[in-house]
Structure formats: C-alpha cells, structure tokens
Amino acid sequence: MPILVIEHDAQDTADVLGRVLTRHGLRQRTIRLHAGEQLPPDLDDVDGIVSLGGPQSGTDDALPWLAGEFRLIQDASVSGIPVLGICLGAQIVARALGGTVSRMAAPAAGLGRVDLTPAGRDDPMFRGLAWYGAWPGSHQDQIEQLPPDARLLARSESCPIEAFACGIFCYGVQFHPEWSAASFRKRCDAGGLLGDIDRAALAATIGDQTESLDRQAERFAENVASFLFPVERVNAGVAKDIHH
C-alpha cells in the first residue's frame, strides 16, 4: 500500500526523498492539491503521509483542502500511521495536533544553520547528520507553539522550532531536507526563495557545497525510509510497534 504524498505546489515535490523511498521499494501516491486533486476521505490502504511545502500560509483557514488535511493527520496520529511534514507541511502537522503557527517578522530563506537539540541528536531521524548543520530553507510562517507532549528536535537563530516529533510516528521539519543542491540552485536562480537575500552569493555557496548538501539530503531520506516508513513496520495501513 502506498505512502500518501501531499503536494501543495508544483514546485514543491518530494525530490530526493521521493527517489529514496522508491529505491527502498516504498510506493507513493501523490495528491496534487495545486492541480485540483482531492484528498482521500480516509486512510484505508495508506501506509503513511508526507505533507510537503508550498507558498501558502499555514495560518490560512480559507484554503479549501486544509480541514481535510488536518483530519487525515489527526486520524493518522490516532492510528499510529507515520507522518512527515516538511515546511508548510510541518506547520499543518503542528496545527492539526494542537500547536500554533504565526507569521514571522521577516522571511527566512537561504542556507541557514540548524542546531539539533539533545533530543534531536539522539533521534534516529537525524542519525548520521551534523549536530550543527546548514540546511536549505524558505518560509515566512513559523511554528510558534508545539503540540502537547511534542519533542523539540532542532532550532535555529531565526526560527525557534525547526524540527519536532509527536510520539514515535509523527515528525515535522521547517527546513527543506528533501531538496537536492540542484533543486536549491534552481530556486535561487529563478527567484523562488523568499526574503531579501544575496542570490548570487547564495548560488556560489550552493555550488561550493553541492556534495555536502546532496549527501545530507540523501542521509535524511534514508533515515525516513529506514525508521519512519520501513516496509516491515506496516501491515494493511497500520504501523506495527517499533522501539527507537
């Protein structure tokens, strides 16, 4: 049964993460909300959820699909079905589970330092990754308050909540671990990053760090495939017990 990949914008695809999940034999069903496709009414025949980024605001309750996405994430949380939210997706996960999202004083974009907390350093989702790493990002909203009982896994100077986990099945990351260096560079060149940044300098930095950016994106995706969505954990859409 497939992992449900929720795509909010044509430019925000699963990228490296999607390729690694496929390599691990994990089928994906992409719902392109930006193209008018509809979310499923329930999680029958769904092994997990990946909620991707997008230009929309995580505070905009007028989005026609937002209530339905909240409901799927809530149902997944109750059922123990794994969930990963990225950027906008992380904000949606946070709100669905009782957290809050707010507009930042200024957008955060570029290649920013993200620091793992002690909990993040010990979490299998960040195994093999730098405790103080540089990750791509571009967002103007932030998770202001975590859901009840959530664990803070990473923070940055511009954003106090960069990654979190609820229980052992649900994660959210505000930055973009799924972007390859080529995807990041393409956004930079096309003006697809928020904020007032020196795009020429950023493009040069991406060029210099291509190998490390691609390596960490691959490692994060491998962790997702191995720890959050491993084939042996899932049976008929219900995640089996796992101990981290």
Image (spheres, rainbow, N blue to C red):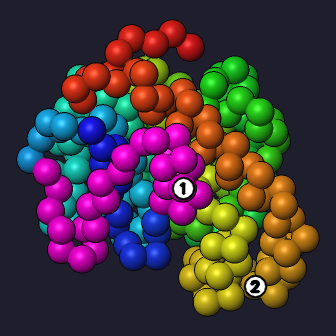
Camera-nearest residue between 142 and 169: 169
Identify the residue shown where x is 54% and y is 27%.
227
Query: Residue 25, percent across and down?
Result: 46, 41
Q: Which residues are magenta?
A: 14-40
Of the numbered discs in the image, which one, if any, rests on residue 199?
2
Q: Residues within 10 Å of mark 2 (few under 14, many from 20)?
A: some
Q: Quadrant of the C terminus?
A: top right
Identify the residue shown where x is 62% and y is 40%.
222
* Type of the residue with mark 2: Arg
Q: Count all numbered tags in the image, as a single digit.
A: 2
* Type of the residue with mark 1: Arg
Foreground disc of the pair 2, 1: 1
Q: Which residue is mark 1?
A: 19
Q: Quadrant of the N terminus?
A: top left
Q: In the rendered image, is residue 175 in sight?
A: no
Q: Is residue 91 left or right of residue 216?
A: left
Residue 156: in magenta span: no
Query: Residue 175, percent across and down?
Result: 60, 54
Identify the residue shown where x is 63% and y is 25%.
124
Q: Mark 1: which secondary structure?
A: helix
Of the numbered discs in the image, which one, if any, rests on residue 125?
none
Q: Is residue 100 left or right of residue 78?
A: right
Tell me which corner region of the image, top left, top right, bottom left or bottom right, holds residue 26.
Answer: top left
* Up/down of 237 relative to 110, above or below: above
Q: Residues within 10 Å of mark 1 (few under 14, many from 20)?
A: some
Residue 37: in magenta span: yes
Camera-nearest residue between 69 and 220: 220
Q: In the rendered image, is residue 231 in sight?
A: yes
Tell me which corner region of the image, top left, top right, bottom left or bottom right, holds residue 42.
Answer: top left
* Up/down of 68 relative to 110, above or below: above
Q: Is residue 170 left or right of residue 115?
A: left
